[in-house]
């Protein structure tokens, strides 16, 4: 595996220099401040990594047999429910988007957490919104939808990762320095919500969610659990066929009973395409809800904005196991 920070090999030193030079060249700024660069630069950095990653050992390929099944009783449900971990997702669909957001507002949301913002450029940073339609999560959960608002983070006191966010995502999951802190994550299944809170420390809440992806047209709506008002709607059409990408596992961060946790959702298979700014008319609209998630989106300046990039994954299969202390 590639570990740019920890491996002192000649190849990794070369990779680090190439990535630094590339980021500084395209952004015109020193690397540590050149983080939220445009989509074309992000694409070039990803392509650079794809070209040279063949020089290194292949990343870990997860097998279900690698994860011993553990029965976990969810005690916040009445009556309690027992689910088997890992969760095994199959035949699902995901829409992942990155947005330009107000840096100060995002940093303020991390004050009470063990994490700090990992990447930024000037007064802006990048935040993500992921919408998921799980056709089957296995165990006693089954099918459900969820939508997560995420922030790229490192532990407080650690330096920001000296590589652009998009290039970090291109690394094998075990080698990434940046994790995504889940600020809000509504789901429309109470067992999925309980498992997210109890097993992984996510800030999940139960909410009605509409999810639609027909060809290249997406429409996702999250509703306030108290008033049924709209928290957010993301809709629009993705132009072109997109750039095909290799499936990539996700790395998230949470605070589980005061312990910072790093969690990898291992993607075993997915048909993934990347759509860049200018090739789609996707727009995020914050509704009239007063829910904290809606207010977070307003604070970040996301109402009425379009994502810098959109990644679609269909026929999505993954394995979600316990997290590890960071």
Image (tube, rainbow, N blue to C red):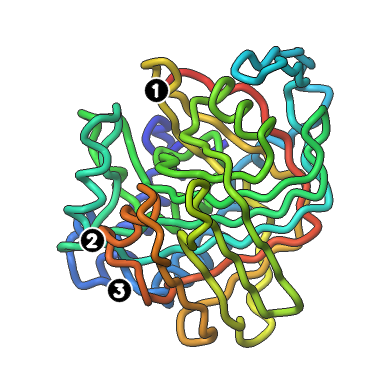
User: First in sequence: mark 1 or mark 2?
Assistant: 2
Q: Looking at the image, can residue 299 be seen?
A: yes
Residue topped by disc 3: 26
Where is residue 246, by image quadrant? Answer: bottom right
Q: Secondary structure at mark 1?
A: strand
Q: Position of residue 181 (x, y in %)?
A: 41, 39
Residue topped by disc 2: 102
| 215 with respect to 206 (left or right) | right
Q: Residue at x 48, y 53 (%)?
A: 227
Q: Is residue 322 above or below residue 175?
A: above
Q: Is residue 4 above or below residue 155?
A: below
> Callout 1: 10 Å neighbours few (<14), some, many (20+)?
some
Cβ atoms at labels 1 and 2 below 8 Å apart: no
| 19 with respect to 24 (left or right) | right
Residue 222 versus residue 34: which sits nearer the camera? Answer: 222
The answer for how far apart the CA atoms under marks 3 and 2 are is 22 Å
Q: Residue at x 16, y 63 (%)?
A: 122
Q: Secondary structure at mark 2?
A: strand
> Callout 3: 10 Å neighbours few (<14), some, many (20+)?
some
Q: Residue at x 59, y 57 (%)?
A: 131
The answer for how far apart the CA atoms under marks 1 and 3 are is 34 Å
Residue 47 versus residue 324: which sits nearer the camera? Answer: 324
Residue topped by disc 1: 260
Where is residue 302, by image quadrant? Answer: bottom left
> Callout 2: 10 Å neighbours few (<14), some, many (20+)?
some
Q: Position of residue 195 (x, y in %)?
A: 63, 26
């Amino acid at each position: 595996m590639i570990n740019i920070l920890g491996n002192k090999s000649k190849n990794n030193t070369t990779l680090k220099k190439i990535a630094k030079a590339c980021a500084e060249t395209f952004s015109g700024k020193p690397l540590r401040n050149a983080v939220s660069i445009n989509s074309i630069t992000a694409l070039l950095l990803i392509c650079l990594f794809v070209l040279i990653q063949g020089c290194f050992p292949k990343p870990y390929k997860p097998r279900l047999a690698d994860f011993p099944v553990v029965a976990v009783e969810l005690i916040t449900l009445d009556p309690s429910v027992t689910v088997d971990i890992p969760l095994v997702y199959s035949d699902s669909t995901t829409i992942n988007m990155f947005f330009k957001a107000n840096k100060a507002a995002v940093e303020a949301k991390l004050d009470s957490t063990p994490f700090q913002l990992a990447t930024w450029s000037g007064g802006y940073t990048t935040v993500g919104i992921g919408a998921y339609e799980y056709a089957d999560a296995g165990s006693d959960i089954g099918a459900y939808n969820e939508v997560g608002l995420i922030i790229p983070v490192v532990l407080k006191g650690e330096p920001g990762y000296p590589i652009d966010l998009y290039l970090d995502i291109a690394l094998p999951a075990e080698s990434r320095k940046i994790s995504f802190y889940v600020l809000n994550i509504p789901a429309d299944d109470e067992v999925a919500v309980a498992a997210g809170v109890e097993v992984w420390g996510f800030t999940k809440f139960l909410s009605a969610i509409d999810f639609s992806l027909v060809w290249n047209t997406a429409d996702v709506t999250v509703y306030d659990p108290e008033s049924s008002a709209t928290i957010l709607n993301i809709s629009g059409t993705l132009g072109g066929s997109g750039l095909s990408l290799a499936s990539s596992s996700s790395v998230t961060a949470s605070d589980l009973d005061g312990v910072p946790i790093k969690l990898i959702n291992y993607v075993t298979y997915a048909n993934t395409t990347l759509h860049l700014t200018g090739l789609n008319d996707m727009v995020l609209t914050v509704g009239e809800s007063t829910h904290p998630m809606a207010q977070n989106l307003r604070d970040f300046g996301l109402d009425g904005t379009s994502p810098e990039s959109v990644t679609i994954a269909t026929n999505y299969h993954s394995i979600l196991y316990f997290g590890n202390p960071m």
